[in-house]
Image: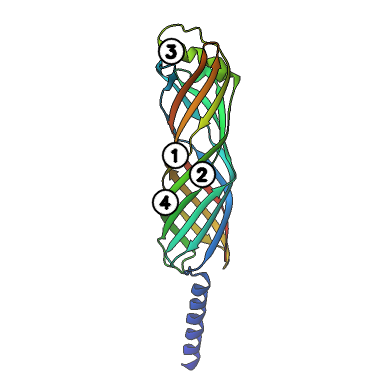
Amino acid sequence: MIKRTLTSSLIAGSMLLSQSAFAYEAGDFFIKGGIAVVDPQETSSDIVINTPPLGPATGAKVGLNSDAQLGLVFTYMATDRIGIELLAATPFEHDISGAGAIAGAGKLGDTQHLPPTLSVQYYLAEPDSKFQPYVGAGINYTIFFNEGTTQTLTNSIGALADIAAGAPTGVVATSTKLDIDDSIGASVQAGFNYEVTENMGLTAAVWWINIDADAEITAETNAGTVKANVNVEVDPLAYMLGAYYKF
């Protein structure tokens, strides 16, 4: 009887120790690293010629490609169920291509961006579970930089002006410049952590991020400076697969 009781106590104690070793607690800090992919789900407005005020080049839109970079995530556990997360990454780079009526134009330009995202997470499992699914919501600030244009865009300015005017304009561009405003918007996410050892594990997550990019194209032409605008609701899905270390 004593032997059975002692054995039961040892088993119960070892289970308790195992649970405590893997339990999430307030004050835990995670660093995650892995491959992050930004996959734009873009919706583009028509390109609009504002200077001179010719209006929209009907049907002339732009599209974006996906890119993969090193993703970094920092998470602080405010409680055993609530985390505060900062998503960061090395700069993503996207080609900007013609779409809609100018789908065959090819690459018009490119841009880099950093999408830092601050989120509050709720962990769905018990704190001592090795598998920790979570959901979250937050705010994103996307910084666009190193915008560039191609000769294809420069050569297309005249055609865009003709479409907007509804008649030949004779505009010939010699150079172009692209500027994209930074964006602020909401984000939502879902993901999980899987504990492999007390301090290390695997992680995967997906985010939907509201990114609204307002771009201005400035062209120097034989008719003076021509300015055009296009708005792109980028609204990407971002994916990350990697590993983490818990402090």
**Among numbered discs 3 and 2, the one appearing first in the sequence:** 2
Mark 1 and mark 3: span between their CA atoms? 28 Å
How many residues crowd mark 3 within 10 Å: few (<14), some (14–19), many (20+)? many
Mark 3 and mark 4: span between their CA atoms? 41 Å
Q: What residue type is labelled 3?
A: Ile
**Among numbered discs 3 and 4, the one appearing first in the sequence:** 4
Q: Name the residue under label 4.
A: 138
Mark 4 and mark 1: span between their CA atoms? 13 Å
- Residue 113, position in %: x, y? 54, 39
- Figure quadrant of residue 167: top left
Q: Which residue is drawn at 41% across and 54% down?
A: 136
Q: Looking at the image, which residue sits at the far bottom? A: 2
How many residues crowd mark 1 within 10 Å: few (<14), some (14–19), many (20+)? many
**Among numbered discs 2 and 1, the one appearing first in the sequence:** 2
Mark 2 and mark 1: span between their CA atoms? 9 Å
SS assignment at label 4? strand
Numbered mark located on residue 115 in the image = 2
Q: Name the residue under label 3.
A: 163
